[in-house]
């Protein structure tokens, strides 16, 4: 059973930065795809960024140029560096992981979520 644990959320002013981290346990090989989704109150969960074990990244248009995703395959960890944060980035951020490289497929493994609040 893959278990994902996030850390790093919090409250920050607009224009500030936060770094989210996630560690996967319960597995002894590298997950093909890891990443982050987010869900704002009253809205659906949306993909923020993903990264494959080979290092290929995908970003939502709304975060391109501001967020950077990275991972450590040996440790099965993934991080999301968020810069130039905006109030509309306020959401619960979920670490995700799975075997498919297709971003149209919802990943099977989810963390419990970490809240990010950006004040104006």
Image: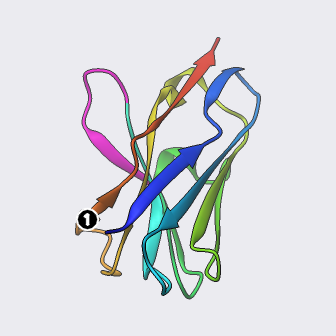
Residue 47 in the magenta stretch? The answer is yes
- Element class at badge 1: loop
Q: Which residue is the extreme one toward the right?
A: 16
Q: Residues within 10 Å of mark 1 (few under 14, many from 20)?
A: few
From the viewer's perspective, is residue 87 above or below residue 30? above
Please say whether residue 100 is visible from this viewpoint.
yes
Residue 93 in the magenta stretch? The answer is no
Percent coordinates x, y for residue 28 in the rendering: 48, 84
Percent coordinates x, y for residue 75 in the rendering: 64, 75
Residue positioned 35% across, 81% down in the render: 101
Please say whether residue 13 is visible from this viewpoint.
no
Query: Where is the C terminus found, in terms of image quarters?
Result: top right
Residue positioned 25% across, 22% down in the render: 42
Q: In which quarter of the image is residue 71?
A: bottom right
Numbered circles on residues, count: 1
Q: How is the image coloured?
A: rainbow
Percent coordinates x, y for residue 21 in the rendering: 63, 52
Q: Which residue is the extreme one toward the top?
A: 120
Between 72 and 45, which is closer to the camera in this rendering? Answer: 72
Between 99 and 84, which is closer to the camera in this rendering? Answer: 99
56 on left or right of 71: left
Q: Mark 1 points at which residue?
A: 108
Residue positioned 63% across, 26% down in the render: 10
Magenta residues?
Answer: 40-48
Percent coordinates x, y for residue 85 in the rendering: 66, 32
Residue positioned 67% across, 47% down in the render: 66
23 on left or right of 29: right
Query: Where is the N terminus found, in terms of image quarters?
Result: bottom left
From the viewer's perspective, is residue 108 above or below residue 73? above
From the viewer's perspective, is residue 51 above or below residue 100? above
Q: In which quarter of the image is residue 96?
A: bottom left
């Amino acid at each position: 059973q893959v278990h994902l644990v996030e850390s790093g959320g919090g409250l920050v002013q607009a224009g500030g930065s936060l770094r989210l981290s996630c560690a996967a346990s319960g597995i002894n090989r590298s997950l093909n795809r890891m990443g982050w989704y987010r869900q704002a109150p009253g809205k659906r969960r949306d993909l923020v960024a993903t990264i494959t074990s080979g290092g290929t990244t995908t970003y939502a248009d709304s975060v391109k140029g501001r967020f950077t995703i990275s991972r450590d395959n040996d440790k099965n960890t993934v991080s999301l560096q968020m810069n130039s944060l905006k109030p509309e980035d306020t959401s619960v951020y979920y670490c995700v992981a799975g075997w498919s490289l297709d971003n149209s497929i919802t990943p099977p493994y989810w963390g419990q979520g970490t809240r990010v609040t950006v004040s104006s």
